[in-house]
Every structure is written in C-alpha cells, then in structure tokens.
Amino acid sequence: MKDFKELKVWHKAYDLSLAVYEVSRSFPREEMYGLTSQLRRASVSVGANIAEGCGRRSDGELVRFLQIARGSASEIEHHLLLARDLKFLEAATHQDIEKRLQEVQRMLTSLVSSIQETAAVRAAAAGVTKGVPGASG
C-alpha cells in the first residue's frame, strides 16, 4: 500500500495529537487517568489507524482503518466538549483544536470516498472487459 507519511491527512492528525498533548498538560492532575488519558489515547489513535491501514494489503482494509480513525476523531470531539464544559479548556483553545479536528474528519471522509469510488470504477471496468474479446480481466 501507500506510505502513510505521504498522506496529508496523517500529517494533520499527527499535528492534532501534538496539540492535544500540549493543551491537556494543563488539565487537573486528578484527570491524568481519566479525561486526559482518554483524550490523548483517542488523538493518537487517529494517526495510528491511518498508518496501520496503509500497511494493509487491500483498499478494503485501508478503508476500514480510515473509518476507525474517523470514529476516534468523533471520540476526540466528545472529549473536547467535555473538557470545555468542565472549564479545563478555554473557549478559544477549544475552537482552535475543534477546527483542526474538523479538517481531519473532512479529509478522512474524502479519502474514504475517493478510495471507494476508485474501487467501484475498477470493478466496473473489470466487468466490462470480461465480455470483450481480447481484453484481459
């Protein structure tokens, strides 16, 4: 498959993880094994699932891991809302990270759609060539 480090979405997810680690340093100490840990774990999971999907053998497996990454991004969204409402994050900080998160979510959705469309075109082309004399398929 593809080298994950070549994907712009992986770089955005990686930068998001760094930002999440940075802002969560100021969370209350008693949250170290609670919200802080959950938020950090989910942020790391996005990039890790993109990387793992790229290491798989098929587009179907890549799509599955990209969808898992999208689920982790939704989990981050939840945790950020909770952190904001518990006053662990200032509104401006929340907005900045939320904006980055939304970009990653959009990019993941677009990448999944693109891979699925490409696979559908390949499948359709393979079906068309099967009945054509001299065509391989």
Image (tube, rainbow, N blue to C red):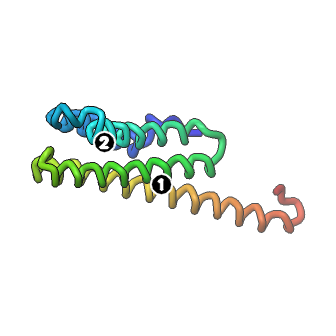
Quarter of the figure that contains the C terminus:
bottom right
Q: Position of residue 36 (x, y in %)?
A: 26, 38
Please name the residue shown 37% across and 54% down the image: 74
Horizontal arrangement in the rendering, residue 44 relative to residue 118 (left or right): left
38 vs 120: above or below? above
Q: Looking at the image, which residue sits at the far right?
A: 133
In the rendered structure, find residue 111 and report the number of the disc placed on it.
1
Amino acid beneath label 1 = Leu
Of 75 and 110, nearer the camera is 75
Q: Looking at the image, which residue sits at the far front?
A: 30
Of 32 and 48, nearer the camera is 32
Horizontal arrangement in the rendering, residue 50 relative to residue 89 (left or right): right
| Mark 1–mark 2 distance (CA, rounded to whole Å) | 24 Å
Of 61 and 42, nearer the camera is 42
Whether residue 68 is visible to the viewer of this picture, yes or no, is yes
Whether residue 15 is visible to the viewer of this picture, yes or no, is no
Quarter of the figure that contains the N terminus:
top right
Instruction: State the count of labels.
Output: 2
In the rendered structure, find residue 39 and report the number of the disc placed on it.
2
Please name the residue shown 24% across and 50% down the image: 80
Horizontal arrangement in the rendering, residue 64 relative to residue 49 (left or right): right
Q: Position of residue 81 (x, y in %)?
A: 23, 54
SS type, badge 1: helix
61 vs 14: above or below? below
SS type, badge 2: helix
**Pointer 1 local density, CA inside 10 Å: few below 14, some 14–19, many at least 20:** some
Amino acid beneath label 2 = Leu
Q: Position of residue 10 (x, y in %)?
A: 40, 41
Q: Position of residue 75 (x, y in %)?
A: 36, 51
